[in-house]
Image: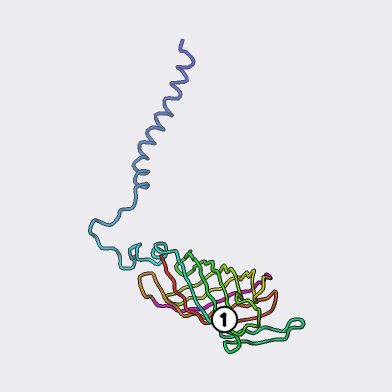
Amino acid sequence: MTAPWMRLARWLRLPLMAATAIGLLAAPARAEEAAPAPGPAPGAALPLDAPPPSDTPEHTALLHPYYVHESFGVNAITHTWASGKVAASTTGPGDKVILFEQIGVGYWVHPNIRLQVTGMFGETESGLKPGAERFTLGAVIPCIFYTNGGFGAGIGPMFAPRAFAAYDFNFGIFSVVSYGIKIDKGTTLALAVQAPVMFVQKDSVAVTPAIILGERF
């Protein structure tokens, strides 16, 4: 008498053989589907509309994404609106000579987009009242820049723990437009117009022409 497990083996032999045969027949087709697309033959020319990856703007931006800069400016005009008992006023270099300096670092996250953090400092050189301090402004400005060739434009919030020659927190919006030229590999010199607008202590707007020296690496 045949053992039950031997009868079961005979019943399973036929479907197992059929499955094996189907697998062997299907293997070449699967291998052909999985094979990678053939690449260009050695020495073959690349298509004209496919520049090498190293020439693309994205690749160039990744090679030199860091940026540091320093700028110097002279306030051209500041208008302050009336507030409480203080009357509105407009001042320029004939009333006060105010110098501004910026030091900042940036990083390109896109060929045309740079994120930047800048420290801005202001000092009044003339027109001060007796006993008044020269240190006028101290602010931190995180901002975003759009760049295209030599052109640049940026905007961001302005946090000023010192403004109007007083340690009394102020807040505003800083904007700037500039145009620069390369003077060395990675080094640019730009002319800019900066326009900070303040809201908290006093409502004011200022326009400052500046020179920016920047280094990209």
**Residue 151 vertical placement versus 3 (above, below):** below
Split into 4 quadrants, where in the image is the C terminus?
Answer: bottom left
The residue singled out by tag 1 in the image is 125
- Quarter of image, res 63: bottom left
**Residue 24 vertical placement versus 172 (above, below):** above
Q: Main secondary structure of the magenta part?
A: strand
User: What residue span does the magenta drawing correspond to?
Assistant: 168-181
- In the image, what residue type sits under mark 1? Glu
Q: Residue at x 68, y 76 (%)?
A: 199
Q: Is residue 170 magenta?
A: yes
**Residue furthest left as drawn:** 43
- Quarter of image, res 132: bottom right
Q: Residue at x 35, y 36 (%)?
A: 24
Q: Looking at this view, is 22 or 135 the one in front?
A: 135
**Residue furthest bottom as drawn:** 94
**Residue 36 vertical placement versus 1 (above, below):** below
Q: Looking at this view, is 57 or 124 the one in front?
A: 124
What x and y, as percent, mark residue 189?
42, 76
Q: Looking at this view, is 11 or 48 the one in front?
A: 48
What x and y, as percent, mark residue 178?
48, 78
What x and y, as percent, mark residue 149?
42, 75
Mark 1, Cα crowd under 10 Å, few <14 / some 14-19 / many 20+, is some
